[in-house]
Image (cartoon, grey):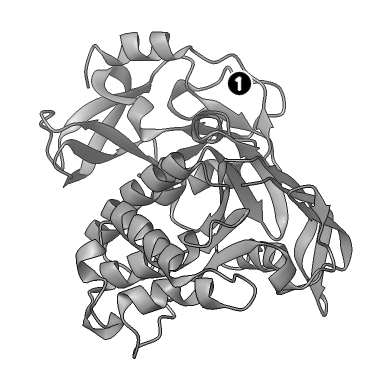
């Protein structure tokens, strides 16, 4: 495995700048997820790494080699697409073995069989090797598509929303499998998604893209707790972060220039003092309950444990955990402000909602 390095890479399509002066290093053995909405430049970034697009400016290195102008075949990367792209008339074994039988690989059949069975074991599809790909479930087909990339043992893997076409339960299962395999193999992976859950659970680091620009990169915890802007704050968290005008709910102690305050729903406390409020909706999610409350004309989401009992129409109060507010200026950039430590937040939250 090896690192992937983008150095001031720009790619334009006519008047549209799809990737704008991107500098990013994916370290050897690191799992980096690029997160952003449609049109943010995620897939174009992958295609640049794969050699399917050529940058208009900047350089790209893989395993220390400048591959900016190199064709895809010379990059030693494996691309996993959103769609399975399996050969329907091939068995699972034949689909997985296909890349090893290309003239550039020159593997003998005994080695091919050993490698395919090894990866099938990792993916837990060894019992399906003799099945035609058309006889598989969606989750099994995606495992085969991932396996076809893994068998090659390339320098790096590029993955373009490979789980997006699966149902929620299969996505959850394959996220766990994919992270386990990546750690077992020590694989270098650059993965793109618009799904915040995938980003949080898979990534060593998350890079947030907006209109072709890398606006922040850090660990999932850093991106969630210390977003650089409103745009980044909105990318992670369900329910989404509460964005309120400064002064709402008594939040008047922000830094100079602050116009918006952001508070995560888990940092909102109902019924323990603060501003008068009314519960207007309740959503039970099993282990957690989401409350939507209204206070002083502002709507606020609060996240609490399943045992907290409140009802729509109930009068209550609302306040924020001290030191949890995020302050943003008029352009959406976060301003520095004192923050409570995790221990302080947990101690305050332990009093209950």
Side of 18 where 218 appears, left or right: left
Seen at 50% across and 22% down, the residue is 251
Side of 28 where 58 appears, left or right: right
Does 54 appear above or below 220? below
Side of 154 where 21 appears, left or right: right
Badge 1 local density, few (<14 within 10 Å), some, or many (20+)? many
Does 45 appear above or below 199? below
Q: What SS does tag 1 mark?
A: loop
Q: Residue furthest right?
A: 57
Residue that carries the numbered disc 1 in the rendered image: 254
Q: Residue furthest bottom?
A: 89
Which of the two residues, 39 or 25, is positioned nearer the viewer here? Answer: 25
Q: Quadrant of residue 12?
A: bottom right
Figure disc tally: 1
Where residue 69 appears, as percent x and y from the top left, is: 85, 68
Which of the two residues, 179 or 19, is positioned nearer the viewer here? Answer: 179
Q: Quadrant of residue 14?
A: bottom right
**Residue 200 visible in this rendered orientation of the protein:** no
Seen at 57% across and 40% down, the residue is 30
**Residue 348 visible in this rendered orientation of the protein:** yes
Where residue 228 appears, as percent x and y from the top left, is: 64, 36
Which of the two residues, 125 or 344, is positioned nearer the viewer here? Answer: 125
Q: Quadrant of the C terminus?
A: top left
Does 300 appear above or below 169? above
Seen at 55% across and 20% down, the residue is 252
Does 340 appear above or below 306? above
Which of the two residues, 74 or 222, is positioned nearer the viewer here? Answer: 74
Seen at 59% across and 71% down, the residue is 106
Q: Quadrant of residue 17?
A: bottom right
Where residue 162 appears, as percent x and y from the top left, is: 44, 65
Where residue 290 appears, as percent x and y from the top left, is: 24, 40
């Amino acid at each position: 495995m090896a690192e992937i390095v983008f150095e001031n890479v720009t790619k334009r399509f006519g008047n549209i700048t799809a990737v704008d002066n991107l500098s990013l290093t994916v370290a050897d053995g690191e799992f980096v997820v690029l997160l952003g909405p449609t049109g943010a430049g995620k897939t174009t970034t992958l295609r640049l790494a794969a050699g399917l697009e050529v940058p208009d400016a900047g350089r790209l290195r893989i395993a220390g080699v400048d591959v900016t102008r190199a064709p895809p075949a010379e990059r030693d990367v494996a691309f996993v697409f959103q769609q399975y792209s399996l050969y329907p008339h091939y068995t699972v074994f034949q689909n997985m073995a296909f890349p090893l039988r290309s003239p550039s690989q020159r593997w003998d059949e005994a080695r091919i069989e050993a490698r395919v069975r090894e990866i099938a074991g990792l993916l837990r599809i060894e019992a399906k090797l003799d099945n035609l790909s058309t006889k598989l479930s969606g989750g099994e087909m995606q495992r085969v598509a991932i396996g076809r990339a893994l068998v090659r043992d390339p320098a790096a893997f590029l993955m373009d929303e490979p789980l997006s076409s699966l149902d929620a339960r299969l996505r959850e299962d394959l996220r766990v499998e994919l992270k386990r395999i990546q750690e077992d193999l020590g694989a270098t992976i650059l993965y793109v998604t618009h799904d915040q859950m995938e980003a949080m659970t898979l990534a060593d680091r998350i890079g947030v893209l907006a209109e072709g620009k890398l606006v922040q990169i850090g660990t999932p915890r850093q991106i969630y707790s210390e977003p650089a802007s409103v745009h980044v704050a909105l990318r992670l968290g369900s329910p989404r972060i509460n964005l309120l005008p400064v002064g709402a709910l008594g939040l008047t102690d922000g830094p100079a220039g602050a116009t918006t305050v952001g508070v995560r729903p888990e940092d909102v406390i109902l019924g323990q003092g603060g501003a008068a409020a009314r519960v207007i909706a309740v959503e039970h999610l099993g282990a957690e309950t989401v409350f939507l409350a209204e206070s002083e004309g502002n709507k606020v989401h609060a996240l609490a444990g399943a045992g907290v009992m409140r009802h729509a129409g109930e009068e209550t109060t609302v306040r924020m955990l001290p030191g949890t507010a995020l302050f943003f200026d008029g352009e959406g950039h976060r301003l520095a402000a004192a923050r409570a430590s995790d221990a302080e937040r947990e101690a305050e939250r332990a009093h209950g909602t």
